[in-house]
Amino acid sequence: MFRKMPCRQNPFSHNRKASKMDYADEMHDQAKPNQAKPSQANFSNAILEKARNSSYIILRGASGAGRQMLDYLLSEGVAKEKFIFWDKKANSIQNVSGVPVLPPFSGNFPLQDTLILHCIKILPYGAEDYVKHGYKEHMNALTLLCPYYIGSGERMLICQPGPFCAKIRCPRQTGQEFCYVPYRVNTGTSRETVVTDKLDFGINTLCTLKCRHCSHYINHYPPENRVNFPLARIIADIECVCAAHDFIRCVWLMGGEPFLHPDFSHILAHFLTQPNVGMLRIVSNGICRISEENMAVMQNERVLLHISRYAGVLNEKQEALLTRNLRYLAEHGITHKLYHPTWQLAPTLRKRDCSIAELEDIKASCSKHIDCHAVFNGVYSACTPISIIALHGVADYIEDKVLLPGDTEKLSREALRDRIVAHHRRPYYQSCAHCDFGDEFVLPGEQGVDSRYAHIGK
């Protein structure tokens, strides 16, 4: 059983020794990559049939994914004269492989007999836009390009990500549900399969920057709590959370700054040994020297490095280090993205006076407990803000989290799974009373300490 932690116990205390979890039962056989879900059988074939029977096929987006979609459908025998591209850059592109490119929602096409395939990785699907214009047949088509769809026409429980997966945002990677997919295990009994699309996995509270509006409030940790979490605890957490899930589509390794952890290469390498983890994404500011050892372990097609570009806030030395890192990443052939993030003003984390009904409404209207499950230093929670609230000692609601076992605790895989499922099904979380993200935006990466958060960590 889990030990109950006293309220407001120091979350950085490492009295709970950790090692590889000793399960009372063995993990059941994982679904193999080539074992398809019967409920998803013939998915690709159904779409291909629809394409062949439509008078027109509009590919939304005339860049990489759209062009790849065109090539794929042509290779499947769909007539070329059916195709039209929609793209905002239609005036400059004009045509792709002889297929005309028009501005979005232009042209006079029969609404009932036109199929729209959304092929833009950075633009949300936006089904309501198609409906508003009267189009009946439309879908997010990026999954059709997955090599594990093509040919078999079946969706996998566990996919094996390749280079293409690192370049697009497919529905498996950005799903908006913590999904429970029913299937039958080897014993013949029925239970729920626990699948999650995104897991934030924190490994430290150290950073090379001092961002004024950091959503992890790194500036406000007291010196003794600015630490790298112990490797033994991290390895135990990896074993626990992976054992409790049938599949984790994408793990986001984060800090702080993850490259400051001296055991970063061992952490990433251990995640890469997990058969039920898809992509590994690393969140970095790029302002930290990346060792050759870390470079080597990132040379894996399942790994994607996200580097935040904080334009206008870095000094000359930091800019030079970022430039150096980008050059080295390219030389080592590591898949990476340099992106310009958008930051909302971080909550103050002060507790609001909320009734249970209000807390239930907050959870029902918030997506964070759906798309950012989290593990930080031995604790699993429905979302990252819950973890951050506890780590800073703002509040420590035992019912808002699941403690992951260490070497002195024994818990079966099924028991841990049940606790995680029950955790997500809670009608509300007490931590929601502290979380008040608004609509105000701030300069990403702006350096300094803001008095708005001065009470945190005290």
Image: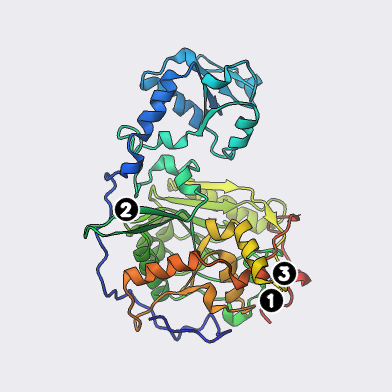
Question: x, y (%) of residue 276?
Answer: 34, 56
- Classify mark 1: helix, strand or loop: loop
Q: Disc 2 to disc 1, how far (Cα)?
A: 45 Å
Question: x, y (%) of residue 412?
Answer: 31, 73
Q: Nearer the viewer, mark 2 or mark 1?
A: 2
Task: Depth check: give the residue in front, 214 or 429.
Answer: 429
**Image: 33 above or below 13:** above
**Residue 442 appears in the figure:** no
Q: Disc 1 to disc 3, how far (Cα)?
A: 8 Å
Marks 1 and 3 in Cβ contact (< 8 Å):
no
How is colour applied across the structure in the image? rainbow
> Callout 2: 10 Å neighbours few (<14), some, many (20+)?
some
Q: Disc 3 to disc 2, how far (Cα)?
A: 43 Å
**Image: 276 above or below 138:** below
Q: Nearer the viewer, mark 3 or mark 2?
A: 2
Label number found at residue 348: 3
Q: Nearer the viewer, mark 1 or mark 3?
A: 3
Q: Which quarter of the image is occupied by the C terminus?
A: bottom right
**Residue 292 appears in the figure:** yes
- The amino acid sitting under disc 2 is Tyr
- Classify mark 2: helix, strand or loop: strand
Label number found at residue 183: 2
> Callout 1: 10 Å neighbours few (<14), some, many (20+)?
some
Asked if residue 149 lies left or right of residue 221, the reply is left
Residue matched to label 1: 456
- The amino acid sitting under disc 1 is Ile
**Hey, which quadrant is residue 421 in on the image?**
bottom left
Question: x, y (%) of residue 27?
Answer: 27, 65
